[in-house]
Amino acid sequence: MRAWFTTNHDENSWNGTEYEKYDNMAKALAVFSATWNGVPLLYSGQELPNTKRIEFFEKDVIAWTGTNALNDFYRTLLNLKTNNLALRGGDPGVQTFRIKTSDPENIFAYLRKNGSKEVLVVLNLSGPKGLRFDILDPTVTGIYKNVFSGAANDFTTEKSFEMQGWEYLVYEK
């Protein structure tokens, strides 16, 4: 099974922090790594977020601040990964579908299903604000709950969106 990640100690030391490499896209890529087929790999300090390169051959400690600004973000993603059967990595019952949108160049959307359990992920992989698009795929229908806000969305009738640059949406059914 593949491990998906945005950083680790080698990447941080040699290639830069996830914020040096991905800037505002880092959280959207973290959503991808936690919801795509496989195992998410998290690195010590990502919940801070850690924006400092760690020395590779020297003892270099993470500056724990106690605030952990991304703690709830990662907790939500990892609880979803643990509790929703649609995100089981390597499970032959899980199906992954790319979802058709009116803006496939900027929006990467996919649905993961396992029986009646579904997780819909919509990633805006572009920087412009106010990107408008529609979900055109008839596979996405019914009422889904946004895992971060708790708000319900009825995809039977509401398939139009406006997203900010690098924004992500994660829904479960």
Image (cartoon, rainbow, N blue to C red):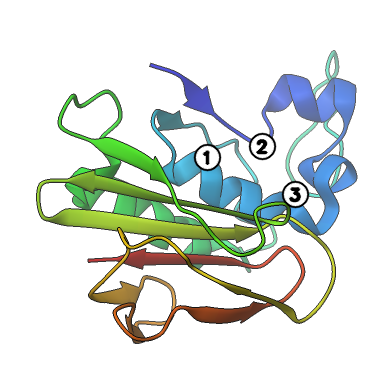
Residue 2 appears in the figure: yes
Look at the numbered disc 1 and give the secondary structure of its residue. Answer: helix
Q: Position of residue 86 (x, y in %)?
A: 23, 45
Which residue is identified by label 2?
6
Q: Give residue 33's mark.
A: 1
Q: Which residue type does callout 2 highlight?
A: Thr
How many numbered marks appear?
Answer: 3
Q: Tell me the residue at 45%/52% (across/down).
A: 99
* Within-10-Å neighbours for mark 2: few <14, some 14–19, many 20+: many
Q: Which of 50/107 is in front?
A: 107
Badge nearest the viewer, 3 or 1:
1
**Could you tell me how far apart the alpha carbons at marks 2 and 1 are, in whole angstroms?**
8 Å
Q: Amino acid at mark 1?
A: Ser
CA separation in Å, label 3 and label 1:
18 Å
Give the residue number, with chain letter if any, for mark 3. 50
Answer with mark 3 or mark 1, whichever residue precedes in sequence. Answer: 1
Q: Is residue 69 left or right of residue 158?
A: right
- At a point 37% along the width and 70% down the height, the residue shown is 147
Residue 137 relative to residue 69: left or right? left
Question: Separation of disc 3 and disc 2 at Cα?
Answer: 12 Å
173 relative to 159 in the view: left or right: left
Q: Closer to the camera, 56 or 154? A: 154
> Are the residues at dot 2 and dot 1 in contact (C-beta closer than 8 Å)?
yes
Q: Secondary structure at mark 3?
A: loop
Residue at the image position 50 percent from the left and 55 percent from the top: 100
Q: Which label lies toward us, 3 or 2?
A: 2
Inspect this view and state whether residue 75 appears.
Answer: no
How far across and down, in percent of the image, does residue 24 sit? 80, 59
Q: Which mark is residue 116?
A: none
* Outermost residue, left side: 115
Q: Residues within 10 Å of mark 3 (few under 14, many from 20)?
A: some
Q: Amino acid at mark 3?
A: Asn
